């Protein structure tokens, strides 16, 4: 049987996406590829870009719905996927249209579950999530936290949905800002490192495309080593650092530039920024 055995939380559920942007497309791709849901179970809506809605409908076989109230009325699970600046208006527009048992899942950065409940005007279960941009290739890491009216079963439903776009971790809502600074913004830190490695390879004389491939495969290989050996990063680093060798020479330069401290400060500043942005919606 295609549906309903492993994914019993989602069998016969109707899912409505409020928002039809990049994260929704990543989720649709992952969920449908993993046959987690059938396209007929899914509806999408947005604000005004109906061409985009029709594109998603023809690409994924999902239903494009122009009326948000119709979307809310026909969904068992409502997924909020608008930008933070549009969160209040889009939720308030659904005030009075949410049923108490309806599960609401938000991917909106920085907006608390309490805020969403207040704007929707319902004591409904709300789950808050923070995926990252690697969701586009099925390798997000997503932090998931439940709001005050969400129970274990609601949490498991959300875990199943987000497992379709990568790995998932349950956290407390207070930890969401840390997730945002670490894994939410994390891909950009890695791209920044990749830019520098690529540039150095080309400056030293490699063709740019060769420098790119060597950089990318090095990042991929190192990530695989971390996963497959389950060793601490410091242990793996020491294993490849022979005294007086090339790696040691390179690492000494990174140490003299306080590289680790810089990366750590970047993550902590991003966490602080997430808290500052979230405070607007308290
Ligand atoms: N992209 C990611 O990988 C990622 C990762 C983590 C978290 N997120 C979060 O996911 C959310 C969406 O991000 P995104 O990158 O997918 O944004 P996006 O591509 O800009 O899409 C936003 C969508 O929201 C729709 N929208 C705006 N106001 C609306 C309203 N009042 N009613 C209904 N729909 C409305 C837009 O419709 P129109 O086009 O018609 O205006 C558009 O379809 C954000 O809160 C972001 O923080 C995204």
Image: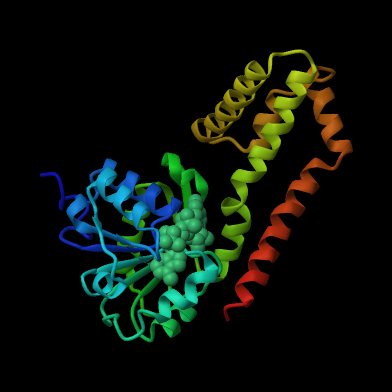
Residue 186 sits above or below residue 173 on the image: above
Position of 122 with respect to 135 (left or right) is left
Position of 179 with respect to 203 (left or right) is left
Q: Residue shown at 65%/30% (left/top)? A: 236
Residue 14 figure quarter = bottom left
Place of residue 157 in the rendered image (x, y in percent of width and height, measured from the top left): 30, 61
Place of residue 106 in the rendered image (x, y in percent of width and height, measured from the top left): 42, 66
Q: Quadrant of the C terminus?
A: bottom right
Residue 129 sits above or below residue 279 on the image: above
Residue farthest to the right, as pictured: 256
Position of 280 with respect to 94 (left or right) is right
Q: Nearer the viewer, residue 226 or 8?
A: 8
Residue 154 figure quarter = bottom left
Q: Nearer the viewer, residue 20 or 233?
A: 20
Place of residue 210 in the rendered image (x, y in percent of width and height, measured from the top left): 64, 16
Q: Residue shown at 82%/34% (left/top)? A: 254
Residue farthest to the left, as pictured: 1
Place of residue 52 in the rendered image (x, y in percent of width and height, measured from the top left): 37, 52
Asked if residue 158 shows in the view, the reply is yes
Q: How is the image coloured?
A: rainbow
Residue 217 figure quarter = top right
Asked if residue 144 shows in the view, the reply is no
Q: Quadrant of the N terminus?
A: top left
Q: Nearer the viewer, residue 79 or 94?
A: 94
Position of 122 with respect to 185 (left or right) is left
Q: Residue shown at 80%/30% (left/top)? A: 251
């Amino acid at each position: 049987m295609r549906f309903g055995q492993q994914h019993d939380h989602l069998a016969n559920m109707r899912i409505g996406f409020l928002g039809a942007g990049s994260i929704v497309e990543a989720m649709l791709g992952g969920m449908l590829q993993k046959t987690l849901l059938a396209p007929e179970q899914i509806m999408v809506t947005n604000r005004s870009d109906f061409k985009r809605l029709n594109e998603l409908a023809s690409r994924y076989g999902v239903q494009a719905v122009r009326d948000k109230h119709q979307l809310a009325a026909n969904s068992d699970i409502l997924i909020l996927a608008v930008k933070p600046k549009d969160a209040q208006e889009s939720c308030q527009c659904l005030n009075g249209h949410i049923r108490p048992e309806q599960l609401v899942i938000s991917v909106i950065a920085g907006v608390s579950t309490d805020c969403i409940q207040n704007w929707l005007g319902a004591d409904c279960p709300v789950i808050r999530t923070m995926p990252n941009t690697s969701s586009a290739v099925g390798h997000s890491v997503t932090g998931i936290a439940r709001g005050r009216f969400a129970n274990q079963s609601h949490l498991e439903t959300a875990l199943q949905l987000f497992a379709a776009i990568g790995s998932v971790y349950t956290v407390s809502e207070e930890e969401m800002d840390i997730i945002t600074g670490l894994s939410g913004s994390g891909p950009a830190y890695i791209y920044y490192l990749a830019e520098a490695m690529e540039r150095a390879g080309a400056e030293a004389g490699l063709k740019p495309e060769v420098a790119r491939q060597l950089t990318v495969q090095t990042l991929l290989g190192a990530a695989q080593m971390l996963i497959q050996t389950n060793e601490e990063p410091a242990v793996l680093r020491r294993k490849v650092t022979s005294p007086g060798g090339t790696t040691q020479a390179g690492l000494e330069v990174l140490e003299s530039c306080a590289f680790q401290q810089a990366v750590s400060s970047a993550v902590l500043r991003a966490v602080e920024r997430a808290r500052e942005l979230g405070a607007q919606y308290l």
